[in-house]
């Protein structure tokens, strides 16, 4: 059995999906579009029931790509996603608003279960719903109540699915058309007036409210023109302080485990090419990224809480005041906040913005938000050049710098949006329609599912790239043209520095000379004149090039390069190796100036080919991703150069 899960945004649809499917979930796209499709299943005895969680939508008359996908699947019986049954989820505390979509779904004549979710919130607000009145109006479907947030109602839903009522052929009101031509648009408006009138009459007979509606004190605080913004900044500061502080211990454990693994593998395996590949290439490359999983998981955890509680919608509301003069609207906040995790879903979620100009500007600036892929770069460089300590005795300095980098990305995105508003012309004027969900405690199961899903995707997608690039880098760093590497090693052994050095230092001097004359050394030396004004050497340059595949590859690339340079001595962590790195004149490579310059570079640079590919798909043109690559590259170079000059 294939079941479609449908409903308005913020109705608890995700809670019901997680309640039914648990961890048996996967994420993909609907065919031919970049709209995300979550699917899962559960077993009812020996029968498997597949659930497709469709995007949240307000209507089946398409106004966005999300709504078009839902509408097209339900109107096409040949679609592989066409359902056998529908679960329509409505928020019982906002029944009248939610019934518009439900009645449209009802008219499709598919077997159906109406789920009145958030039943506890409705009672708490003094709302009484007469189920018998609803059953009289819709006698040929099943109606159940749930409070999915705390896990109540699963059995009622599964029982209703097992015993679907046969549809009688009756409709609530004639169905609206799919196309938006002028004639159909007029007909759709007339049908929607009729539909809303019938819903209002139904609500009058089926729902009573015992308490007088009152605006909550918390909402007055969250959406206030002063306290709302201050609290949002406070939330961001707490998030990044926590990410930097709480992840320290698991990161140290992971770093120690991979260091031990590299040393154990080096001593356990026969010396040779395979030993070098595994111990100097693959293990350091993968370990250099896995070490940052705790911080990435914490970021997803906090974003999940903001979404679950309903606070994120309040942020959308207050930010509309700021976004509007910049050529955006409050709905742009969701893609931009999503881009703090990853720009790819952020760019894709911009499809909910109806106005083309506002959507395009949102897509173009989304990668300027510091995504989770930047965390490995930021935290490595912060630990390298920013001293430990506290401001006012409780604000972690390193965490504060991390917060500052995220804030810099946000400011850069907003200023860029203002410039793009002046450059991109559009005749139509955008608007924002938003319904604030009720504030509620988070359902921790939903948050954990979200974290596990995002980390899994992060590891699987990035892991393939890391392994491939680590192997390639190891080869380029271990071999060179002709006899240049061997000649360089032999020449280094004649130097006075080598003669006076200890045995361990002699091995490092010899391998460093070989690395400089390897294939990767020649490539690095070729690009070094371009990046030297920014304070970077050729090894950093190589990592900048490889990290175009994915930003976090920067760390894995440095891990591989320094592991080859150490020639099997894996006792030093990447951080120690970078602290010991010297320029030809003997000065440290990584100083406050070069470190901050690198951080600023990664704030602004478009170092993600996957994001560019998604931008191309969303805009249906190569013009905009190329434009995005160029303007972000120029911003990165100019601002990192100015940062280096200011601090050198």
Image (cartoon, rainbow, N blue to C red):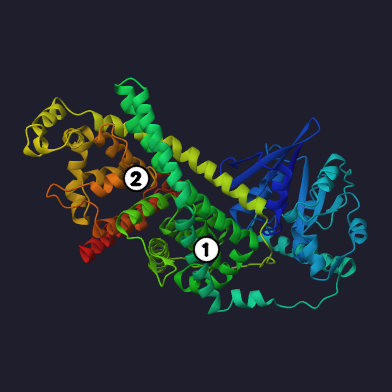
SS of the residue under disc 2: helix
Q: Is residue 344 visible?
A: no
Q: Residues within 10 Å of mark 2 (few under 14, many from 20)?
A: many
The x and y percentages for residue 447 are 62, 52
209 lies above or below 195 = below
The x and y percentages for residue 586 are 14, 49
At x 45% / y 40%, what residue is drawn? Answer: 462
Outermost residue toward the top in this view: 270
The x and y percentages for residue 386 are 32, 60
Point out the image quarter for the N terminus.
top right
At x 90% / y 63%, what residue is drawn? Answer: 130
Quarter residue 101 falls in: bottom right
Q: Is residue 519 visible?
A: yes
At x 89% / y 44%, what residue is drawn? Answer: 165
Report the disc number at residue 287. none
The x and y percentages for residue 126 are 83, 71
Q: How many marks?
A: 2
Report the disc number at residue 554. 2
Point out the image quarter for the C terminus.
bottom left
Q: Residues within 10 Å of mark 1 (few under 14, many from 20)?
A: many
Report the disc number at residue 332. 1
């Amino acid at each position: 059995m294939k079941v479609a899960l449908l409903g308005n945004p913020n109705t608890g649809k995700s809670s019901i999906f997680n309640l039914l499917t648990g961890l048996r979930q996967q994420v993909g796209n609907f065919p031919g579009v970049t709209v995300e499709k979550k699917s899962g299943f559960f077993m009812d005895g020996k029968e498997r029931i597949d659930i497709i969680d469709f995007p949240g939508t307000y209507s089946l008359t398409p106004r966005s790509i999300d709504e078009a996908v839902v509408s097209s699947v339900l109107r096409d019986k040949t679609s592989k996603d066409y359902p056998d049954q529908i679960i329509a989820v409505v928020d019982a505390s906002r029944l009248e608003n939610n019934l518009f979509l439900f009645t449209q779904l009802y008219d499709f004549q598919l077997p159906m279960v109406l789920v009145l979710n958030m039943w506890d919130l409705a009672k708490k607000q003094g709302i009484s719903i007469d189920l018998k009145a609803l059953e009289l109006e819709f006698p040929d479907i099943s109606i159940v109540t749930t409070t999915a947030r705390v896990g109540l109602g699963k059995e009622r839903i599964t029982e209703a699915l097992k015993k679907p009522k046969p549809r009688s052929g009756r409709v609530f009101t004639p169905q609206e058309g799919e196309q938006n031509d002028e004639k159909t648009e007029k007909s759709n408006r007339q049908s929607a007036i009729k539909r809303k009138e019938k819903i209002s009459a139904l609500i009058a007979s089926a729902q009573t409210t015992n308490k007088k509606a009152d605006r909550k004190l918390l909402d007055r605080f969250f959406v206030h023109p002063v306290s709302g913004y201050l609290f949002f900044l406070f939330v961001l500061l707490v998030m990044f302080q926590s990410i930097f502080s709480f992840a320290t211990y698991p990161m140290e454990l992971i770093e120690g485990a991979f260091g031990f693994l590299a040393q154990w593998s080096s001593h356990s395996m026969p010396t040779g090419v395979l030993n070098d590949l595994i111990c100097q290439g693959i293990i350091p490359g993968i370990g250099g990224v896995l070490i940052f999983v705790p911080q990435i998981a914490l970021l997803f955890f906090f974003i999940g809480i903001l979404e679950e509680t309903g606070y994120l919608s309040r942020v959308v509301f207050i930010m509309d005041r700021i976004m509007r003069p910049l050529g955006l609207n409050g709905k742009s906040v969701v893609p931009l906040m999503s881009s703090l995790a990853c720009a790819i879903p952020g760019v894709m979620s911009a499809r909910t913005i109806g106005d083309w100009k506002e959507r395009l500007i949102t897509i173009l600036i989304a990668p300027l938000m510091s995504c989770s892929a930047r965390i490995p770069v930021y935290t490595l460089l912060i630990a390298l050049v920013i001293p430990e300590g506290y401001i006012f005795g409780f604000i972690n300095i390193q965490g504060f710098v991390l917060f500052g980098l995220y804030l810099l990305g946000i400011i850069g995105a907003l200023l860029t949006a203002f410039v793009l508003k002046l450059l991109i012309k559009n005749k139509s004027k955008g608007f924002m329609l938003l319904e604030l969900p009720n504030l509620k405690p988070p359902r921790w199961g939903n948050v954990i599912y979200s974290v596990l899903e995002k980390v899994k995707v992060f590891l699987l997608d990035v892991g393939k790239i890391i392994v491939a690039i680590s192997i390639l880098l190891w080869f380029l760093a271990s071999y060179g043209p002709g006899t240049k590497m061997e000649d360089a090693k032999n020449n280094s052994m004649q130097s006075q520095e080598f003669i006076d050095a200890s045995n361990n230092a002699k091995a490092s001097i010899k391998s460093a000379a070989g690395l400089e004359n390897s294939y990767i050394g020649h490539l690095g030396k070729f690009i070094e004149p371009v990046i030297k004004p920014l304070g970077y050497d050729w090894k950093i340059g190589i990592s900048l090039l490889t990290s175009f595949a994915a930003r976090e590859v920067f760390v894995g690339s440095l891990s591989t390069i320094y592991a080859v340079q150490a020639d099997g001595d894996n006792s030093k962590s990447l951080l120690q190796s970078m602290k010991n790195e010297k320029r030809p004149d003997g000065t440290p490579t990584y100083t406050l100036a070069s470190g901050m310059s690198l951080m600023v570079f990664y704030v602004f640079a478009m170092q993600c080919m996957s994001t560019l590919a998604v931008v191309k798909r969303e805009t249906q043109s190569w013009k905009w991703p190329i434009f995005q690559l160029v303007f972000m590259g120029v911003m990165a170079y100019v601002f990192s150069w100015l940062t280096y000059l200011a601090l050198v």
